[in-house]
């Protein structure tokens, strides 16, 4: 059971690779409250894109569940496999003349900086989204993060801390992207995560995808927010 996906099957990862010149490998687990500890406060677990796109396929879901089970039950074996696969990935990218990149939290939020991965592979570029504000500023230089916004009251303290930093903050909007939000300019975040993670103190505007927008209305979650400029026009 290989851990990494290297065929650019994820649409966003494929677009990021095409626009950046990187070759990007990714790790997709099946999220739960242990590997996504900020999801409860952010109110996003029920809106997760884990079962959208290729995630609708039972074989893909089973693979992600098996990887998550291995992580929970035998981290030593999991990490040994991961290090070996990253070693092969970096070597393969060198041979093809590309810089190796990796997204380890495609649909999870594990603090990979605690496991020495990016220290072991300084030539590897990593990026992820996170809802764990204490991770900001605590990763190696070759592992960059984007903070993920939610308007849930229980999450307000984390958002407040994140906005005091120069890290980009992603916001999922319903009804298109505004020009500004949270006192920051909004850029189109659906183009390339390589651009997003290096964008500095901006809002990364993401459009609600799949059925997540409808589910957010039903659940009452504040993870997806209405485009305030659209609301103003309607008023």
Image (cartoon, helix red, strand yellow):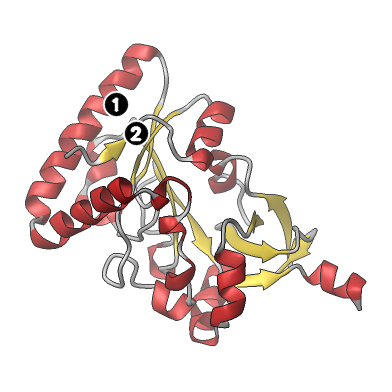
State the SS at label 1.
helix
Residue farthest to the front? 58
Say if residue 39 shows up in the picture. yes
Q: Is residue 26 above or below residue 72?
A: above
Q: Determine the residue positioned at 83% across, 68% down.
A: 229
Q: Badges 2 and 1: C-beta atoms under 8 Å apart?
A: yes
Residue 141, percent from left and from top: 40, 44
The vertical placement of 109 against 43, above or below, is above
What's the residue at 66%, 72% (across, down)?
A: 225
Dot 2 falls on a residue whose secondary structure is loop
Q: Residues within 10 Å of mark 1 (few under 14, many from 20)?
A: many
Left or right: 62 as drawn, with respect to 6: left
Q: Residue at x 34, y 31 (%)?
A: 6
Q: Which quarter of the figure is the N terminus placed in?
A: top left
Which comes before the other along the chain, label 2 or label 1?
1
- 79 on left or right of 106: left
Residue 207: x, y in percent?
65, 56
Residue appearing at x 32%, y 47% in the figure: 60
- Relative side of 20 to 59, left or right: right
Residue 43: x percent and y percent? Answer: 48, 77
Q: Is residue 39 above or below residue 140?
A: below
| The C terminus: image quadrant | bottom right
Is residue 151 in view?
Answer: no
Q: Is residue 139 above or below residue 193?
A: below
Q: Callout 2: few (<14), some (14-19), or many (20+) C-alpha neighbours within 10 Å?
A: many
In the foreground, 6 or 52: 52
Q: Quadrant of residue 231?
A: bottom right
Residue 124 rendering spot, x and y as whole percentages: 34, 33
Q: How far apart, in angstroms, are the residues tagged by discs 2 and 1?
A: 7 Å
The disc placed on residue 124 is 2
> Which label was assigned to residue 90?
1
């Amino acid at each position: 059971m290989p851990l990494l996906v290297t065929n650019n099957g994820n649409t966003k990862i494929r677009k990021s690779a095409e626009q950046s010149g990187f070759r990007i490998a990714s790790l997709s687990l099946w999220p739960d409250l242990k590997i996504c500890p900020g999801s409860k406060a952010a109110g996003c677990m029920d809106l997760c894109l884990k079962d959208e796109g290729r995630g609708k396929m039972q074989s893909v879901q089973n693979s992600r569940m098996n990887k998550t089970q291995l992580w929970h039950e035998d981290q030593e074996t999991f990490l040994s496999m991961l290090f070996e696969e990253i070693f092969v990935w970096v070597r393969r990218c060198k041979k093809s003349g590309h810089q190796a990149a990796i997204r380890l939290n495609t649909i999870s939020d594990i603090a990979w900086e605690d496991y020495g991965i990016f220290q072991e592979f300084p030539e590897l570029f990593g990026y992820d989204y996170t809802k764990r504000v204490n991770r900001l500023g605590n990763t190696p230089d070759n592992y960059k993060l984007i903070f993920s916004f939610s308007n849930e009251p229980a999450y307000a303290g984390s958002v407040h801390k994140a906005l005091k930093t120069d890290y980009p903050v992603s916001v999922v909007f319903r009804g298109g992207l505004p020009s500004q939000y949270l006192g920051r300019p909004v850029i189109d975040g659906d183009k390339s995560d390589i651009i997003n993670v290096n964008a500095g103190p901006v809002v990364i505007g993401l459009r609600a995808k799949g059925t997540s927008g409808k589910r957010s209305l039903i659940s009452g979650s504040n993870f997806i927010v209405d485009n305030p400029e659209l609301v103003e026009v309607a008023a």
